[in-house]
C-alpha cells in the first residue's frame, strides 16, 4: 500500500450548532479534509447508538458526533442526554471490541467554523493513523469459519 | 415505486467549478428510483424553480432532491416550489454540496466523489419521506402581561389598544414599578410621576385590560397560543369592590412606624397602606406582618373607621386559572444591596445612600417633599460625593456587566442637586462616562459645564466618618494622585440586578436565564424580545439593564409580536414532531423523563365498555418542538420523529 489510506468518516450533527458551524466553515471558504460525510439531525439528543453502529457496520472507519456546547442546546438539554448516552455507550463499544477512539465526540457551535474545520482535519488524521476499520469484517469471517473445538 | 427527481445546481461557479455536475447528474440518473436527474446554472432562480415544477408535473415525481447550497439557505424556497407543483413540500430535501463540499475542498475529484455520496444519501432518505401536514393549533386571543412597571404597562396598552384582551398582573399593591419611584427622568428632566401616573390610570381604566394587582403567578402550563396560568390573588384584607379609596383607615392606623418600601426605607408608612399617594388602584392593603390586630388580636381601628365595611380580616388568598395565548414577561429588576461594599459604609452610615434613595429624596412626593436633606439629621448637605459603578463592572462583586443607566442618572442627580441646593458641591467618581443615547451625552456634558459637577476619574477605596463628615478617599487617575473629600452625603450608583426570585420564576414560566438571572432572548440581535419558549416574550429590565426609552421600545416590540400571533385563528407549525405507536408502547414513561417540554402525556386506551386496557404515551404536537430525544430514549422503538425517522436516517447512512 503505497497510497495513503483515506478513511471514510460519518458525522452525526445537530442542525442548530454544528451543522451551522459547518456551513460557516463553508461560507468562510476554509479548507478541510474531504473524508467526512455529514448527516443532519435536529439535535444530538436524536442520535441513537444504533446510528453509530450502523455507520461502522456500513464500512465507516470512524464516526463523529457533534452538537451544541453544554448549556447552549436549542432544545435546552438534548445535548446532555447525548453526552450521558455516550458515556455509557463508549463502555459498550470497548466491550464489544470496537476501539472507542474511532468514535469522536465534540461540541462545536454555529460560530465555530474554524473549530469545525480543524476538528475535521484532526479527526481524519487520527482515524488515518488507526487504519481501516476491519474488526467488523473479521468478526463476520470468524462467524463463518467452523468453530474450533 | 419511487420516482425521485434530482436537481443539481451549479450555483454559477460556486459548485460548478469544483464539482463535476455533469458526471454527478449522470451518476444519479443511474441510481435506482431516480426518474429525472438534471443540472442547471441556478435552480433558485425563477426559471430554475419553474423547471423543477415542470419536472414534478411531467414525471409525477414522488420526491425531490435539490443538490445545491445549505438547506438553511433554500430549503424553504424549494419546498414552496414543490408545493406549488402539487407535491407535498416535505417530500423535498436538500443535498448540501456547496457549504459542505465545493467551498471547502481543493481537489475536484474528491469534491465530486463527496457530492455524489451526499446526493445519493439524500435520495435514499427522500424515498422514505412521508407526506406531512403543518400542525395547526388554535390561539386564545388573550395576553398575559406579568409586571406592572413601565414596560408591562406599555405592552398591555399597546395590545389592548389593538383590540385584544390583556390580563395585567402586578405583585405589588399598585402599578408603577420602579419608574413611579423616580423623581425626574433623564435626559429631559420631566417629572417621572407626571408621565407615569396617567399611563397607570389609562391601563387600569382600559376596557380591554383586566388589572390584577397584589397578585402573583403560581404556575404556567400549556404552550404557544394555549397557556393556562394560575394566578394567586393575595389577600389584601380590603374588599376591592367596596373600598372607595378615601384613605380614612390609613390616617387612623396606629402602626405608623413601618419602614416604607416605596421610599426605600427613608420614609414611614402604616400597616394598612397604599405604597404611594397616586397608587393605582387606590385601594389599600393590610401588611399582615406589621398589623397590630394580626399580631395581638386587638385593634381593628381601620375596620371601625371604614364607612363602607370594606375591611375583612378573614380574607383568604384566592386562585384563578386564566387561559391566555401569549405571555409578556416584564418583571423588572432590583437595585443591588450594597452592604457588600463594607468599605463604603452603606448600611453603617445613614448618610451613605444608593441612587434609588436619592431619587426618593429628590422626588416631590418623597419623604422630604423634594428637598435634598440628609437622612441622619435632616440637614441640607453642602458637599455630596457620587460613586459610580458601585457594584457594576466589578467581577469581585459578581457583576461583570455595565448597569447602563448609572452614568446618566448620576449626572441627573448632580444636576438636581445643583438646582435644589445652590452653592452645593457635587463630586462624581467614575470609571468611564457611558452616555450613548439620544441627547444623553449632551445631558452629561450639561451636568459638568452648566451645573459644575466635578467629575473625578477613579475609584474610591474607603469612606469613613470623621468630625461629623464622611471622609471619602479615592484616586484621581487623570492627575495621578490620591484625593480626600469631606462630604456630607455619599450616593452609591449601585448595580441593577435581576429580581431575587428571577431564576425561580423563569422555571415557573419555562424560559431561560443567564448567570445573573436576566432572562435569555431567543437571539441577542435578531430576536431580542422573544424568549426561547414560543409564545413567551420579554420586555424591560428583566432581560438586561435598560433605561426607560429602551424598556418602552422593547415593550411595544413585544406587543407587535403578540398581535402578530393573534392575527390568525390557527397557528401553523412545522410538522417535525414525535409520534407514538400506541400498539407497541409499553408505558414505561422514559420519554416523559427525556422530554424537555413536558409534551408527552399519558393516554388511557379503553375498551368498548370504557375499561382502561393500558396506558400509553401520547405526544402533544402543540408542545413538541421536535428534538427527538424521546425517540432515542424509547425502549420499545415506539416513538419516531417525523422528518427524521429511524428508517430515513438508516437509509441516509446506507446511502453514503
Image: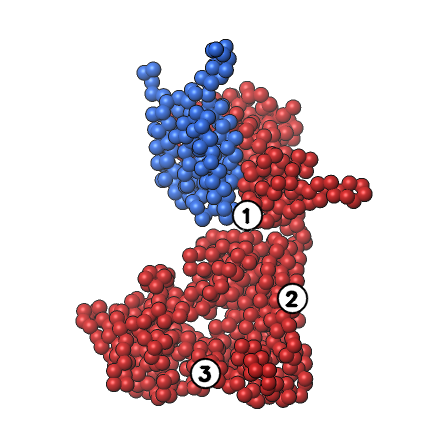
The answer to whether tags 1 and 3 share a subunit is yes
In three-dimensional space, the C-alpha distance between marks 1 and 3, rounded to whole angstroms, equals 47 Å
- At horizontal 62% and vertical 40% (from top left) the residue drawn is B588
Against A18, residue B543 (above or below) is: below
The answer to the question of whether label 1 and label 2 lie on touching residues, with beta carbons closer than 8 A, is no
The answer to whether tags 2 and 3 share a subunit is yes
The red-tinted chain is B
Q: Which residue lies under the disc numbered 2?
A: B319
The answer to whether tags 1 and 2 share a subunit is yes
Task: Measuring from the top left, give residue B515's x and y in whole percent.
Answer: 42, 57
In three-dimensional space, the C-alpha distance between marks 2 and 3, rounded to whole angstroms, equals 33 Å
Task: Measuring from the top left, give residue B106's x and y in whole percent.
Answer: 36, 29
Q: Of the residues under marks 1 and 2, which one precedes in the sequence?
A: 2
Q: Mark 3, residues whose alpha carbon is within 10 Å: few (<14), some, or many (≥20)?
A: some
Q: Is residue B327 left or right of residue A36?
A: right
- At horizontal 25% and vertical 82% (from top left) the residue drawn is B466
Q: Which residue lies under the disc numbered 3?
A: B267
Q: Mark 2, residues whose alpha carbon is within 10 Å: few (<14), some, or many (≥20)?
A: some
Q: Is residue B202 left or right of residue B357?
A: right
Q: Nearer the viewer, residue B95 or A33?
A: A33
Q: Nearer the viewer, residue B369 or A81?
A: A81
In three-dimensional space, the C-alpha distance between marks 1 and 2, rounded to whole angstroms, equals 27 Å
Q: Of the residues under marks 2 and 3, which one precedes in the sequence?
A: 3
Against B43, residue B595 (above or below) is: below
The blue-tinted chain is A
- Quarter location, residue B435: bottom left
Amino acid at each position: 500500500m503505497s497510497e495513503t489510506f483515506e478513511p471514510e468518516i460519518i458525522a452525526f450533527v445537530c442542525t442548530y450548532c454544528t451543522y451551522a458551524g459547518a456551513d460557516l466553515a463553508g461560507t468562510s471558504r476554509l479548507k478541510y479534509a474531504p473524508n467526512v460525510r455529514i448527516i443532519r439531525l435536529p439535535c444530538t439528543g436524536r442520535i441513537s447508538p444504533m446510528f453509530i453502529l450502523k455507520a461502522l457496520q456500513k464500512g465507516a472507519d470512524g464516526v463523529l458526533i457533534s452538537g451544541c456546547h453544554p448549556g447552549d442546546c436549542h432544545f435546552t438539554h438534548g445535548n446532555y442526554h447525548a453526552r450521558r448516552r455516550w458515556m455509557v455507550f463508549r463502555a459498550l463499544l470497548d466491550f464489544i471490541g470496537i476501539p472507542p477512539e474511532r468514535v469522536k465526540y465534540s461540541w462545536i457551535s454555529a460560530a465555530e467554523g474554524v473549530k469545525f474545520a480543524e476538528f475535521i482535519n484532526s479527526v481524519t488524521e487520527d482515524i488515518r493513523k488507526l487504519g481501516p476499520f476491519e474488526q467488523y469484517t473479521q468478526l463476520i469471517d470468524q462467524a463463518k469459519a467452523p468453530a474450533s473445538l | 415505486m419511487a420516482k425521485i427527481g434530482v436537481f443539481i445546481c451549479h450555483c454559477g461557479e460556486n459548485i460548478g467549478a469544483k464539482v463535476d455536475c455533469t458526471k454527478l447528474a449522470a451518476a444519479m440518473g443511474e441510481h435506482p428510483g431516480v426518474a429525472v436527474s438534471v443540472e442547471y446554472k441556478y435552480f433558485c432562480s425563477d426559471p430554475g424553480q419553474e423547471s423543477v415544477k415542470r419536472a414534478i408535473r411531467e414525471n409525477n415525481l414522488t420526491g425531490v432532491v435539490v443538490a445545491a447550497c445549505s438547506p438553511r439557505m433554500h430549503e424553504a424556497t424549494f419546498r414552496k416550489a414543490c408545493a406549488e407543483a402539487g407535491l407535498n413540500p416535505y417530500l423535498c430535501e436538500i443535498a448540501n454540496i456547496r457549504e459542505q463540499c465545493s467551498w471547502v475542498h481543493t481537489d475536484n475529484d474528491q469534491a465530486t466523489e463527496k457530492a455524489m455520496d451526499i446526493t445519493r444519501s439524500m435520495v435514499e432518505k427522500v424515498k422514505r419521506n412521508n407526506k406531512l401536514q403543518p400542525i395547526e393549533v388554535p390561539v386564545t386571543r388573550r395576553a398575559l402581561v406579568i409586571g406592572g412597571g413601565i414596560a408591562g404597562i406599555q405592552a398591555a396598552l399597546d395590545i389592548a389598544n389593538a383590540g385584544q384582551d390583556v390580563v395585567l398582573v402586578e405583585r405589588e399593591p399598585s402599578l408603577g414599578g420602579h419608574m413611579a419611584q423616580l423623581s425626574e427622568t433623564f435626559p429631559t428632566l420631566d417629572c417621572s410621576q407626571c408621565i407615569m401616573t396617567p399611563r397607570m390610570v389609562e391601563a387600569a381604566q382600559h376596557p380591554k385590560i383586566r388589572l390584577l394587582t397584589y397578585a402573583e403567578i403560581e404556575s404556567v402550563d400549556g404552550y404557544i397560543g394555549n397557556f393556562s396560568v394560575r394566578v394567586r390573588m393575595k389577600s389584601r384584607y380590603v374588599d376591592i369592590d367596596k373600598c372607595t379609596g378615601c384613605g380614612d383607615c390609613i390616617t387612623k392606623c396606629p402602626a405608623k412606624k413601618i419602614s416604607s418600601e416605596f421610599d426605600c426605607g427613608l420614609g414611614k408608612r402604616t400597616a394598612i397602606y397604599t405604597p404611594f399617594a397616586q397608587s393605582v388602584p387606590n385601594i389599600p392593603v393590610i401588611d399582615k406582618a406589621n398589623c397590630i390586630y394580626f399580631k395581638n388580636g386587638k385593634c381593628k381601628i381601620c375596620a371601625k373607621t371604614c364607612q363602607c365595611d370594606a375591611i375583612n380580616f378573614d380574607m383568604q388568598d384566592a386562585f384563578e386559572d386564566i387561559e391566555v395565548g401569549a405571555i409578556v414577561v416584564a418583571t423588572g429588576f432590583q437595585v443591588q444591596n450594597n452592604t457588600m461594599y463594607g468599605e463604603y459604609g452603606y448600611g453603617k452610615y445613614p448618610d451613605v445612600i444608593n441612587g434609588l434613595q436619592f431619587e426618593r429624596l429628590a422626588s416631590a412626593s418623597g419623604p422630604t417633599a423634594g428637598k435634598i436633606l440628609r437622612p441622619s439629621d435632616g440637614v441640607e448637605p453642602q458637599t455630596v460625593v457620587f460613586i459610580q459603578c458601585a457594584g457594576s463592572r466589578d467581577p469581585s462583586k459578581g457583576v461583570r456587566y455595565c448597569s447602563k443607566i448609572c452614568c446618566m442618572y448620576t449626572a441627573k442627580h448632580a444636576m438636581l442637586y445643583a438646582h435644589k441646593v445652590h452653592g452645593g458641591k457635587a463630586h462624581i467618581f467614575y470609571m468611564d462616562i457611558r452616555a450613548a443615547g439620544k441627547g444623553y451625552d449632551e445631558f452629561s456634558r450639561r451636568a459638568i459645564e452648566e451645573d459644575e459637577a466635578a467629575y473625578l476619574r477613579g475609584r474610591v477605596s474607603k469612606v469613613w466618618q470623621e468630625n461629623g463628615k464622611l471622609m471619602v478617599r479615592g484616586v484621581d487617575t487623570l492627575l495621578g494622585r490620591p484625593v480626600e473629600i469631606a462630604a456630607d452625603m455619599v450616593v452609591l450608583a449601585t448595580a441593577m440586578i435581576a429580581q431575587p426570585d428571577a431564576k425561580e420564576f423563569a422555571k415557573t414560566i419555562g424560559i431561560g436565564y443567564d448567570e445573573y438571572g436576566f432572562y435569555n432572548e431567543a437571539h441577542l440581535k435578531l430576536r431580542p424580545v422573544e424568549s426561547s419558549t414560543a409564545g413567551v416574550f420579554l420586555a424591560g429590565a428583566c432581560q438586561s439593564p435598560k433605561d426607560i426609552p429602551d424598556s418602552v421600545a422593547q415593550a411595544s416590540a413585544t406587543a407587535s409580536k403578540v398581535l402578530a400571533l393573534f392575527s390568525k385563528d390557527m397557528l401553523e407549525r412545522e410538522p417535525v414532531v414525535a409520534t407514538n405507536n400506541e400498539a407497541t408502547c409499553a408505558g414505561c414513561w422514559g420519554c416523559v423523563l427525556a422530554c424537555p417540554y413536558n409534551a408527552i402525556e399519558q393516554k388511557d386506551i379503553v375498551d368498548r365498555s370504557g375499561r382502561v386496557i393500558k396506558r400509553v404515551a401520547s405526544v402533544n404536537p402543540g408542545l413538541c418542538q421536535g428534538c427527538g430525544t424521546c425517540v432515542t430514549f424509547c425502549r420499545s422503538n415506539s416513538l419516531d420523529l417525523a422528518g427524521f425517522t429511524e428508517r430515513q436516517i438508516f437509509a441516509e447512512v446506507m446511502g453514503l
